[in-house]
Amino acid sequence: ASATGGDGWRVDVRPYFVQARGVYAELGRVHSPVLNNTRTVLAYVPPGAVENVRRRTYADVLLAHDGQNVFNDSTAFAGRSWRAADTLDALAAEGAVRDVLVVAAYNTPSRIDEYTYSYDASVGAGGRADAYLDLLFGDVLALSRAR
């Protein structure tokens, strides 16, 4: 938040007081009857919201694909995550980013079908992206709002 005084001075208030790190946790699992699968959904809550437990809305929400790779080395492909929480914590400490809620949905064995809009006969996959987006913007975001 920021305030501007009558003499033109401006004060930027940091998004947190003591808490320097956000937290990530499993929100739950969502099932898609259209895609016929179930996936885990994780969320990263930024430092400012960890301390301010009454905060329920975010100006910025990042939906991340391949959720198992986003935060945790133990679940990431090849054992190395993208370390999104560490990066966002560091950027927040520098004042380089606003608080952002990250909602990360795991992929499934149907990843190529879900991430591409058109069917590719040469690989025998693709064409389910609209259904995947419906899942993200419907059930996945609804799960994050409920928590």
Image (cartoon, helix red, strand yellow):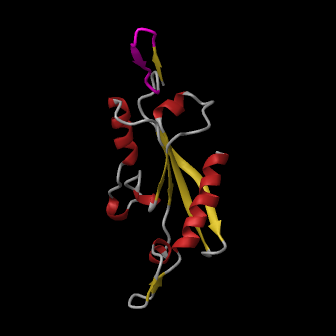
Q: In this view of the protein, which residue sits in the foreground, 74 or 143? A: 143
Inspect the magenta stretch and tell me whether residue 28 lies in it. Answer: no
Q: What is the x, y in percent for residue 66?
A: 44, 62
Relative to residue 80, is residue 42 drawn left or right? right
Extreme-top residue of the structure: 7
| Residue in the picture at 55% in, 69% down | 132
Relative to residue 147, is residue 61 drawn left or right? left
Query: Magenta stretch: dominant SS?
Result: loop
Q: What is the x, y in percent for residue 126?
A: 47, 80
Relative to residue 76, is residue 103 drawn left or right? right
| Residue in the picture at 46% in, 81% down | 118
State whether residue 81 is above or below residue 85.
below
Q: What is the x, y in percent for residue 91?
A: 34, 36
Number of numbered discs visible in the structure rendering: 0
| Residue in the picture at 45% in, 11% down | 5
| Residue in the picture at 58% in, 72% down | 131
Q: In this view of the protein, which residue sits in the foreground, 116 or 111? A: 116
Quadrant in which the C terminus appears: top right
Q: In this view of the protein, which residue sits in the foreground, 23 or 118? A: 118
Q: In this view of the protein, which residue sits in the foreground, 116 or 139? A: 116
Question: Start and end of the magenta stretch?
Answer: 5-15
Q: What is the x, y in percent for residue 98?
A: 43, 35
Inspect the magenta stretch and tell me whether residue 14 lies in it. Answer: yes
Residue 12 lies in what quarter of the image? top left
